[in-house]
Protein backbone atom coordinates (compact mmCIF):
# COMPACT_ATOMS: atom_id res chain seq x y z
CA UNK A 1 0.00 0.00 0.00
CA UNK A 2 1.29 3.46 -0.91
CA UNK A 3 1.97 6.09 1.72
CA UNK A 4 0.26 9.48 1.36
CA UNK A 5 3.64 10.94 0.37
CA UNK A 6 4.04 8.32 -2.36
CA UNK A 7 0.51 9.08 -3.59
CA UNK A 8 1.35 12.80 -3.68
CA UNK A 9 4.44 12.23 -5.82
CA UNK A 10 2.53 9.82 -8.08
CA UNK A 11 -0.10 12.49 -8.78
CA UNK A 12 -2.85 10.56 -7.00
CA UNK A 13 -5.47 11.79 -4.55
CA UNK A 14 -3.70 12.10 -1.16
CA UNK A 15 -4.55 13.25 2.36
CA UNK A 16 -2.46 16.31 3.25
CA UNK A 17 -3.25 15.80 6.96
CA UNK A 18 -1.10 12.67 6.98
CA UNK A 19 1.38 12.90 9.89
CA UNK A 20 4.41 12.28 7.64
CA UNK A 21 3.37 15.10 5.29
CA UNK A 22 2.56 17.43 8.18
CA UNK A 23 5.99 16.74 9.68
CA UNK A 24 7.64 17.57 6.36
CA UNK A 25 5.63 20.81 6.15
CA UNK A 26 6.60 21.87 9.68
CA UNK A 27 10.28 21.08 9.02
CA UNK A 28 10.09 23.17 5.85
CA UNK A 29 8.50 26.12 7.67
CA UNK A 30 11.27 26.12 10.26
CA UNK A 31 14.04 26.07 7.64
CA UNK A 32 12.28 28.75 5.55
CA UNK A 33 12.16 30.98 8.62
CA UNK A 34 15.96 30.78 8.79
CA UNK A 35 16.40 31.23 5.02
CA UNK A 36 14.15 34.29 4.97
CA UNK A 37 15.41 36.03 8.12
CA UNK A 38 19.02 35.10 8.82
CA UNK A 39 21.71 37.64 7.98
CA UNK A 40 24.48 35.11 8.58
CA UNK A 41 25.41 33.74 5.14
CA UNK A 42 26.78 30.46 6.54
CA UNK A 43 23.63 29.79 8.59
CA UNK A 44 21.48 30.65 5.57
CA UNK A 45 23.49 28.40 3.23
CA UNK A 46 23.24 25.49 5.67
CA UNK A 47 19.46 26.01 5.94
CA UNK A 48 19.11 26.07 2.12
CA UNK A 49 21.12 22.85 1.82
CA UNK A 50 18.85 21.21 4.41
CA UNK A 51 15.63 22.62 2.96
CA UNK A 52 16.03 21.65 -0.70
CA UNK A 53 16.18 18.05 -1.86
CA UNK A 54 19.30 18.86 -3.85
CA UNK A 55 21.28 22.08 -4.17
CA UNK A 56 24.00 22.84 -6.69
CA UNK A 57 26.78 25.37 -6.20
CA UNK A 58 26.17 29.09 -5.81
CA UNK A 59 22.42 29.20 -5.17
CA UNK A 60 21.21 32.74 -4.46
CA UNK A 61 17.81 33.55 -2.97
CA UNK A 62 17.42 37.32 -3.03
CA UNK A 63 14.54 38.18 -0.72
CA UNK A 64 11.62 36.25 0.74
CA UNK A 65 10.99 32.76 -0.64
CA UNK A 66 8.07 30.41 0.00
CA UNK A 67 7.59 26.68 -0.54
CA UNK A 68 5.60 23.89 1.11
CA UNK A 69 7.96 20.95 1.54
CA UNK A 70 11.32 22.02 0.14
CA UNK A 71 12.69 18.50 -0.16
CA UNK A 72 10.82 18.04 -3.45
CA UNK A 73 12.89 20.84 -5.06
CA UNK A 74 16.16 20.17 -6.89
CA UNK A 75 18.31 23.14 -7.87
CA UNK A 76 21.31 23.13 -10.23
CA UNK A 77 24.43 25.31 -10.21
CA UNK A 78 24.38 29.13 -10.42
CA UNK A 79 20.64 29.50 -9.81
CA UNK A 80 19.26 32.93 -8.86
CA UNK A 81 15.78 33.20 -7.31
CA UNK A 82 14.56 36.74 -6.73
CA UNK A 83 12.16 37.97 -4.03
CA UNK A 84 8.59 36.95 -3.33
CA UNK A 85 8.72 33.69 -5.30
CA UNK A 86 6.45 30.79 -4.34
CA UNK A 87 7.12 27.16 -5.18
CA UNK A 88 4.05 25.08 -4.34
CA UNK A 89 6.10 21.89 -4.39
CA UNK A 90 3.45 19.26 -3.79
CA UNK A 91 5.38 17.35 -6.45
CA UNK A 92 8.94 17.56 -7.75
CA UNK A 93 10.30 20.88 -9.02
CA UNK A 94 13.60 20.68 -10.87
CA UNK A 95 15.67 23.72 -11.86
CA UNK A 96 18.64 23.20 -14.17
CA UNK A 97 21.91 25.11 -14.18
CA UNK A 98 22.07 28.89 -14.65
CA UNK A 99 18.36 29.48 -14.09
CA UNK A 100 17.27 33.05 -13.28
CA UNK A 101 13.85 33.56 -11.72
CA UNK A 102 12.56 37.14 -11.43
CA UNK A 103 10.40 38.44 -8.54
CA UNK A 104 6.83 37.32 -7.88
CA UNK A 105 7.11 34.09 -9.89
CA UNK A 106 4.85 31.21 -8.85
CA UNK A 107 5.33 27.50 -9.58
CA UNK A 108 2.20 25.47 -8.78
CA UNK A 109 2.41 21.66 -8.86
CA UNK A 110 -1.06 21.10 -7.37
CA UNK A 111 -4.46 21.26 -9.06
CA UNK A 112 -8.07 20.36 -8.35
CA UNK A 113 -10.85 18.82 -10.43
CA UNK A 114 -12.79 21.02 -12.84
CA UNK A 115 -15.95 19.27 -11.61
CA UNK A 116 -16.81 21.02 -8.31
CA UNK A 117 -18.44 17.83 -6.98
CA UNK A 118 -15.05 16.08 -7.12
CA UNK A 119 -12.99 18.65 -5.18
CA UNK A 120 -13.71 17.23 -1.72
CA UNK A 121 -13.64 13.66 -0.46
CA UNK A 122 -15.04 12.06 2.67
CA UNK A 123 -12.91 10.13 5.15
CA UNK A 124 -14.10 7.02 6.99
CA UNK A 125 -14.91 9.22 10.03
CA UNK A 126 -17.20 11.44 7.91
CA UNK A 127 -14.85 14.44 7.80
CA UNK A 128 -14.16 16.10 4.47
CA UNK A 129 -10.83 16.74 2.81
CA UNK A 130 -9.66 18.72 -0.19
CA UNK A 131 -8.69 16.50 -3.12
CA UNK A 132 -5.51 17.65 -4.79
CA UNK A 133 -3.69 16.12 -7.74
CA UNK A 134 -0.06 16.98 -8.47
CA UNK A 135 2.34 17.01 -11.40
CA UNK A 136 6.06 17.88 -11.49
CA UNK A 137 7.61 21.00 -13.02
CA UNK A 138 10.95 20.77 -14.83
CA UNK A 139 12.98 23.80 -15.94
CA UNK A 140 16.07 23.21 -18.09
CA UNK A 141 19.47 24.91 -18.18
CA UNK A 142 20.03 28.57 -19.10
CA UNK A 143 16.43 29.65 -18.53
CA UNK A 144 15.37 33.19 -17.60
CA UNK A 145 11.88 33.47 -16.14
CA UNK A 146 10.56 37.02 -16.05
CA UNK A 147 8.67 38.69 -13.23
CA UNK A 148 5.19 37.66 -12.17
CA UNK A 149 5.22 34.43 -14.20
CA UNK A 150 3.02 31.46 -13.26
CA UNK A 151 4.04 27.91 -14.20
CA UNK A 152 1.51 25.10 -13.82
CA UNK A 153 2.21 21.48 -12.81
CA UNK A 154 3.10 19.06 -15.58
CA UNK A 155 5.11 21.65 -17.53
CA UNK A 156 8.62 21.06 -18.83
CA UNK A 157 10.61 24.08 -20.01
CA UNK A 158 13.51 23.26 -22.33
CA UNK A 159 17.04 24.64 -22.25
CA UNK A 160 17.85 28.21 -23.33
CA UNK A 161 14.37 29.67 -22.86
CA UNK A 162 13.16 33.15 -21.91
CA UNK A 163 9.70 33.38 -20.36
CA UNK A 164 8.33 36.92 -20.66
CA UNK A 165 7.05 38.80 -17.62
CA UNK A 166 3.46 38.06 -16.66
CA UNK A 167 3.24 34.85 -18.69
CA UNK A 168 1.14 31.88 -17.57
CA UNK A 169 2.87 28.69 -18.72
CA UNK A 170 0.37 25.84 -19.03
CA UNK A 171 2.11 23.65 -21.64
CA UNK A 172 5.63 22.43 -22.35
CA UNK A 173 8.03 25.01 -23.79
CA UNK A 174 10.53 23.91 -26.47
CA UNK A 175 14.22 24.69 -26.08
CA UNK A 176 15.72 27.80 -27.67
CA UNK A 177 12.60 29.96 -27.58
CA UNK A 178 11.10 33.11 -26.13
CA UNK A 179 7.56 32.63 -24.84
CA UNK A 180 5.03 35.03 -23.39
CA UNK A 181 1.37 35.75 -22.88
CA UNK A 182 -1.63 34.14 -21.22
CA UNK A 183 -1.46 31.30 -21.93
CA UNK A 184 2.21 31.42 -22.94
CA UNK A 185 2.99 30.87 -26.61
CA UNK A 186 6.23 30.88 -28.58
CA UNK A 187 7.07 34.45 -29.65
CA UNK A 188 10.34 33.76 -31.42
CA UNK A 189 13.22 31.28 -31.62
CA UNK A 190 16.60 31.81 -29.99
CA UNK A 191 19.88 30.62 -31.47
CA UNK A 192 21.00 27.40 -29.78
CA UNK A 193 23.80 27.82 -27.27
CA UNK A 194 27.17 26.45 -28.29
CA UNK A 195 28.35 23.67 -25.99
CA UNK A 196 31.81 24.19 -24.47
Image (cartoon, helix red, strand yellow):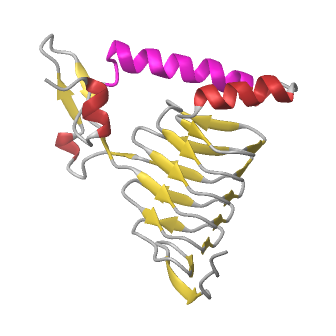
Q: Is residue 9 left or right of residue 186?
A: left
Total tally of numbered discs in the picture:
0
Between 183 and 55, the one nearer to me in the picture: 55
The residue drawn where x is 61% and y is 25% is: 50
Between 70 and 171, the one nearer to me in the picture: 70
Q: Is residue 45 above or below residue 183?
A: above
Q: Main secondary structure of the magenta part?
A: helix
Q: Is residue 66 left or right of residue 44?
A: left
Residue 132 position, x and y percent, is: 30, 38
Residue 194, by quadrant, is bottom right
The residue drawn where x is 30% and y is 45% is: 112
Q: Is residue 8 left or right of residue 85?
A: left
Between 166 and 78, the one nearer to me in the picture: 78
Image quadrant containing the N terminus = top left
Residue 90, by quadrant, is top left
Residue 100 position, x and y percent, is: 69, 59
The residue drawn where x is 57% and y is 76% is: 180
Residue 161 position, x and y percent, is: 58, 73
Q: Is residue 127 above or below residue 90?
A: above
The residue drawn where x is 79% and y is 22% is: 43
Image quadrant containing the C terminus = bottom right
Residue at the farthest right position: 39
Q: Which residues are magenta?
A: 16-34
Amino acid sequence: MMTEHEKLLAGQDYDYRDPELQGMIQRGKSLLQTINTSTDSKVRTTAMQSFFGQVGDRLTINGTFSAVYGQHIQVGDDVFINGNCTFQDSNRITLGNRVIIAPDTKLYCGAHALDATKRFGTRADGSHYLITYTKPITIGDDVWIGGNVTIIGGVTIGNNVVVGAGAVVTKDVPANTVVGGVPAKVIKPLPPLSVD
